[in-house]
Amino acid sequence: MGRTSYLIACCVVVVLAAVSTADSQTGTSGGATLAGTVKAAEAGDPDAMFRLGTAYLEGKDVRPNAATAFSWMQKAAEKDHAKAQSSLGRMYSDGTGVPRNLSLAYR
């Protein structure tokens, strides 16, 4: 291994170690992030409501549950969260977590 390759390999190791340390210090593991999102959503944060709805819709860090996803999306949409409103329309259009209703989907 040449000197340049050795230096690059050392830099990569240092960067990876720094990222790993930062993640453990900021609590970015799935469980910690989910707990914080739940707490914020229950406190009325529309962004957190949207993230939680998305998590339930996609099954990220939770068991997929379309009805629960719909509920959180609806709460965020009622607080004028644009992405939640769009997702809610798509859920009504597809019948995901709620009976299909095209009149509500395009409202």
Image (cartoon, helix red, strand yellow):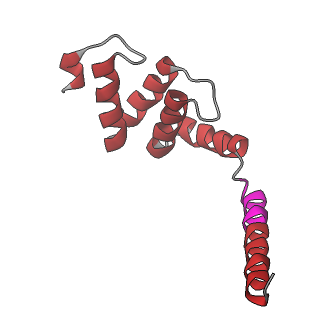
Numbered-mark total: 0
- Would you place residue 13 above or below residue 100 in this image? below
Q: In which quadrant of the rendered image does the C terminus lie?
A: top left
- Judging depth in this view, the residue of 79 and 9 nearest the camera is 9
Q: Is residue 15 left or right of residue 96?
A: right
Look at the image and say whether residue 80 sits in the magenta stretch.
Answer: no
Q: Is residue 25 visible?
A: yes
Q: Quadrant of residue 30?
A: top right
Which residue is pictured at 54% across the width and 38% down the height? Answer: 41
Q: Is residue 81 visible?
A: no
Please provide percent x and percent y for residue 44: 49, 39
Q: Main secondary structure of the magenta part?
A: helix
Q: Quadrant of residue 82?
A: top left
Please provide percent x and percent y for residue 48: 51, 42
Which residue is pictured at 44% across the width and 42% down the height? Answer: 46
- Would you place residue 67 above or below residue 86 in this image? above
Q: Is residue 19 left or right of residue 60?
A: right
Q: Is residue 99 left or right of residue 6?
A: left
Which residue is pictured at 31% across the width and 28% down the height? Answer: 90
Please provide percent x and percent y for residue 10: 79, 79
- Judging depth in this view, the residue of 32 and 59 nearest the camera is 59
- Would you place residue 105 above or below residue 14 in this image? above
Which residue is situated farthest in the front direction here? 1
The stretch in magenta equals: 19-27
Q: In which quadrant of the rendered image does the N terminus lie?
A: bottom right
- Would you place residue 16 above or below residue 30 in this image? below
Please provide percent x and percent y for residue 19: 72, 66
- Judging depth in this view, the residue of 105 and 13 nearest the camera is 13
